[in-house]
Image (cartoon, rainbow, N blue to C red):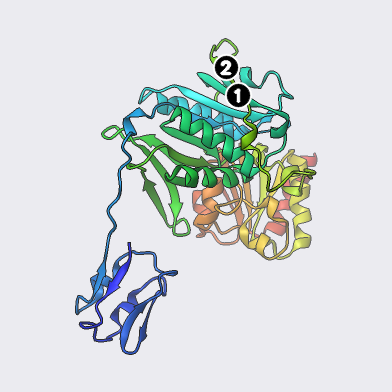
Amino acid sequence: MPIKINKETCVGCGACVAQCPFGALSLVDNCAFVEETKCKFCGKCATVCPCEAITVVKEEMKVQDDLGSYKDIWVFAEQKKGQVAGVSFELLAKARELAAQKPNQVVAVVLHDGCNAEIEKQLISKGADKVVSVSAPELKDFDDLTYSNVLYRLVKERKPEIILCGATTIGRALMPRVAVMLKTGLTADCTGLHIDPETGLLIQTRPAFGGNIMARIRCQNTRPQMATVRHKVFAEAEPDPSRSGEVETVAFNKEDLSLRSKVLEVVENIGEQVKLTDANIIVSGGRGMKGPENFALLKELAEALGGAVGASRAAVDAGWIPYAHQVGQTGKTVCPTVYIACGISGQIQHLVGMQSSDVIVAINKDPECPMMKIANYAIEGDLFEIIPLIIKELKK
């Protein structure tokens, strides 16, 4: 969708340059010039041009021929050492809701090395109607090239209508590759999924423009429709051991093995040690903590409550606490029973990551900040006086 500028009618007034929100336009030789690497094709320049010298040329979208042959909702069941990631169980529960509106089968796809013989039964008990299982020693550790080759082959053969995956480190490496190979769309970090009752398409909701708007996206011309979702966005269903389902074992094709790279060793980093997304109680600190040494106070409170320590992006960017503790749009999405925000103003980017908490407690000097307004319990005052008092009462 290129931007075309008619040099004969352009008078170099600069109206488009002033209005471009992305800084993609400039004046060269008294004529508007667009830098395509910066242009987002919003079309605002064309609407403000007094000479009508700018035209947004929309490319005709090609519709895939065999859309009607795609069916079923797939969930990529991410696993490490035979343990399925919690976000995969959450997506199975959401897939059941979506499948009830189609209707479609819910299919869990798992790639593993066979170290957990119960993994297929576990997926069925959590909502899968069918499990497609590919087991081989070569799949023990995640390799983006090998995994994407295997998943691509399965999709081309079986034609799922929808594919869901967790927006984890693995999901963010795997799904874009598969989407490019399939020449279809992918919506990342979704916070909402539902079926449009009129079109039957998957409507994918996600924050955009720094969380200032919620974009609703659909993939109407190609299949499958693909989306990644963060941990704790949807509720996980209770396991039902009485559920029955089909398990299909698919042989690993040696041609899918990546020859470019080989995993020599997997070393757990601090991000895997900090189980922030699994904590029932989280104590988070922001810019109001004033320095890294004061996070010891939050750690003491978290230990007294049996919880974990979180942080806002401002605290992480300042180097006060590692990124593994960050909550928000560019950090982790959490859904604890209790979230205690200490010295956090509550910008939308942070709220996106924790607003689903059951109970929110805010401690802040500013009663008008967003966090204090959304909190169930807002405590106005100096956190360095309030938190020690809370710890003292808890220790009693």
Q: Quadrant of residue 34?
A: bottom left
Q: Position of residue 255 (x, y in %)?
A: 62, 36
Amino acid of disc 1: Ser
Q: Mark number for residue 179?
A: none
Residue assigned mark 1: 133
Placement of the N terminus among the 4 image quadrants = bottom left
The vertical placement of 44 against 388, above or below, is: below
Q: Secondary structure at mark 1?
A: strand
Pick whichever of labels 1 and 2 is earlier in the sequence.
1
- Front residue of 284 and 59: 59
Q: Nearer the viewer, residue 376 or 266?
A: 266
- The relative height of residue 239 versus residue 58 in the rendered view (above or below) is above
Give yes or no for contact between labels 1 and 2 (Cβ–Cβ under 8 Å).
Answer: yes
Judging from the image, what secondary structure is the residue with disc 2 in?
strand
Name the residue located 58 percent from the left edge and 54 percent from the top edge: 330
Residue denoted by label 2: 247
Q: Residue at x 48, y 47 (%)?
A: 180
Q: Residues within 10 Å of mark 2 (few under 14, many from 20)?
A: some
Image x and y of residue 153, in percent: 53, 34
Left or right of 43: which side holds 386?
A: right
Q: Quadrant of residue 277?
A: top right
